[in-house]
Image (spheres, rainbow, N blue to C red):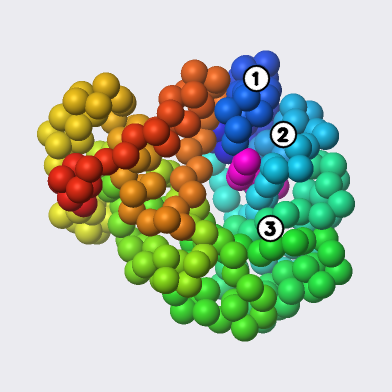
Amino acid sequence: MRITGPGTYGPPPDRRAALAALRRTRDLGITLIDTADSYGPHVSESLIAEALHPYGAELVIATKGGYERPGPGIWQVNGHPRHLRAALDGSLRRLRLDRIALYQLHRIDPSVAEADQFGFLQDAQRTGKVEHIGLSEVSVDQIERARRFFTVVSVQNRYNLVDREWEAVVDYCDREGIAFLPWAPLQQGAMRTGTRALVKRLIGRLPPQQSLSRIAARRGATRAQIAIAWLLRRSPMMFPIPGTSRVDHLDENVAAETIELSDEEYDALT
């Protein structure tokens, strides 16, 4: 999402830097890249193909459909099968793929019957356009309803040190062997929001900021790296997807994988 313009709309401010960051993933051994047709729209998928096609056999490109992007900062959910079909075909074309390894429903559209949305994904898998199917921003009940149509291999909800709203979903994925891809994984402090209810809900869950800073200093790491390390310790099914458009930031994020928090450190942040 970060390799697009302001408001996740249009081309990136520095196209060369975005392509360099994508190509750097090969050097770092990254095997999962998450994107969506609505990032740009279409910009992220096109840049991924330009930088990395032909893809290595080990690389999984996960993309999503179900959102429209009419302007900067504007997201409109659209789960009508006609739109999903066009979105999937467009992703296949832009990514230069015959089949998408992991296709995720970006949001369940409340105005469309779930059976129609899940049924489309089921048919896409049967016809070979999609290998595996995932969901985004869903509850446990929604995951279980989707599993009546297909095997859910991944769930992508917002989850980080600050926002633990989907704790029950993380636990469910852990038990069921479903990959959990937390978006906004680098959030470390109070979120900027105009919704007081959200602030009240989160304030009791803020990790001790002194503990976060102390652990980072002792480890010679950044606070963001410790936030990623905490996620990796949280569950073996956790696959953080921090976004970036710069090589140096990408290198920093990947280096967090080498940090193994002690029980004391993990508990201090939990």
Q: What numbered label is drawn on residue 20?
A: 1
Going 15% across and 54% down the picture, which residue do you hit? 204
Q: Main secondary structure of the magenta part?
A: loop
Q: Amino acid at mark 2?
A: Ile
Mark 2 or 3, nearer chain start: 2
Mark 1 or 3, nearer chain start: 1
Question: Which of these two is toward me, 71 or 9?
Answer: 9
Which element carries disc 2, helix, strand or loop?
Answer: helix
Look at the image and tell me in which quarter the N terminus lies. Answer: top right
**Percent from the top left, x then y, of residue 124?**
79, 67
Q: CA distance from mark 1 to mark 3?
A: 25 Å
Q: CA distance from mark 1 to mark 2?
A: 11 Å
The total of numbered circles placed on residues is 3
Q: In the rendered view, would you say 201 is above or below 10?
A: below
Q: CA distance from mark 2 to mark 3?
A: 16 Å
Q: Which residue is mark 3?
A: 103
Q: Amino acid at mark 1?
A: Ala
Q: Amino acid at mark 3?
A: Tyr
Identify the magenta region.
31-38
